[in-house]
Image (cartoon, helix red, strand yellow):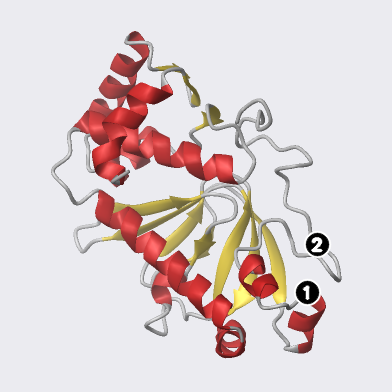
Amino acid sequence: MDAVNNVAFPRQDARTLADDGNALRFCSTCAFSQACLDEGMDKASLGELHVLVEHVGPFHPGEHVFREGDPFEAIAAVRAGTVKTYVVDRDGHEHVHGFHLPGEVIGLNAIDGDRYPCNAVALDTVMLCRFSFPKISVLATRVPGLQKQLFRLLSRDIGRAALLAGDWSADQRMAAFLVGVSRRLAARGFSSSRFQLTMPRTDIANYLRLAPETVSLVLRRFQEEGVLQVERRELELLDRDALETLAAPVLRD
């Protein structure tokens, strides 16, 4: 795969950089284009239905896309960068829900209410495609494939969160995290073996329900065993089979 996909995230080239599309072609990061195309609709048809997609950004590191309690008006697809979603409990402790990469959607967990139930913050320079949820909901009633895609994206988010609920070892959790990130980046045209972890290790530890020192220890041991190479946030997977074997029970492959 990497003979073709050799761009290490978050670097971009013409294949991985999201374009704006045109009158007959969707933006390359559109999370809903295939569902609409399957129904025989092109971008011009969507315009006739007043489904407006707004390109927003850049959001700089530490800048919030939305905050818990903000009125829910839109969902957004990440065009570039990484977005972290999290909540803060009554004691002021942060709990990371997830990391959203290019082509992935944020805001879906607000569908059943009128306010966002979590915070979304840029970890690096982030660009988004913003979809008015009331308008896309109307479109979904006319395009069954789009409604199915919305449910698919929502169930994917729920599934990722549920993966960490098991009694997994630190090695298994880290392997599943790295394999998952690798697969998601490869689906967007990036290298599956070389990428940058744009999130701090403290955030990774929080997400995996591990201590930060445990994350550092596991990465160091993986490196000593020749499973991967780490240089600051730059990471290269050297023994994919070993990681896949460790991750398999968690990812349920």
Question: Which of the image's four quarters has the C terminus?
Answer: top left
Q: Which residue is mark 2?
A: 21
Residue 62 coordinates in the image, percent (x, y): 51, 50
Identify the secondary structure beneath mark 2.
Answer: loop
Residue 223 coordinates in the image, percent (x, y): 37, 14
Residue 107 coordinates in the image, percent (x, y): 47, 69
Q: What number is the disc on residue 188?
A: none
Instruction: Identify the residue at image location x=37%, y=33%.
Output: 201
Q: In screen coordinates, is 142 left or right of 42?
A: left
Q: In screen coordinates, is 158 left or right of 195?
A: left
Q: Is residue 188 above or below residue 105?
A: above
Distance of mark 1 from mark 2, alpha carbons?
9 Å
Q: Is residue 212 visible?
A: no
Q: In screen coordinates, is 199 left or right of 32?
A: left
Residue 104 falls in image quadrant: bottom right
Tell which residue pokes out farthest to the left in this image: 167
Q: In screen coordinates, is 102 left or right of 169?
A: right
Instruction: Identify the residue at image location x=80%, y=65%.
Output: 25
Q: Which amino acid is tagged 1?
A: Lys
Q: Earlier in the sequence, mark 1 or mark 2?
A: 2
Q: Which residue is mark 1?
A: 43
Q: Is residue 237 above or below residue 199?
A: above
Crowding around mark 1 (Cα neighbors within 10 Å: few <14, some 14 to 19, many 20+) is some
Asked whether disc 1 touches disc 2, contact meaning CB atoms under 8 Å apart, the reply is yes
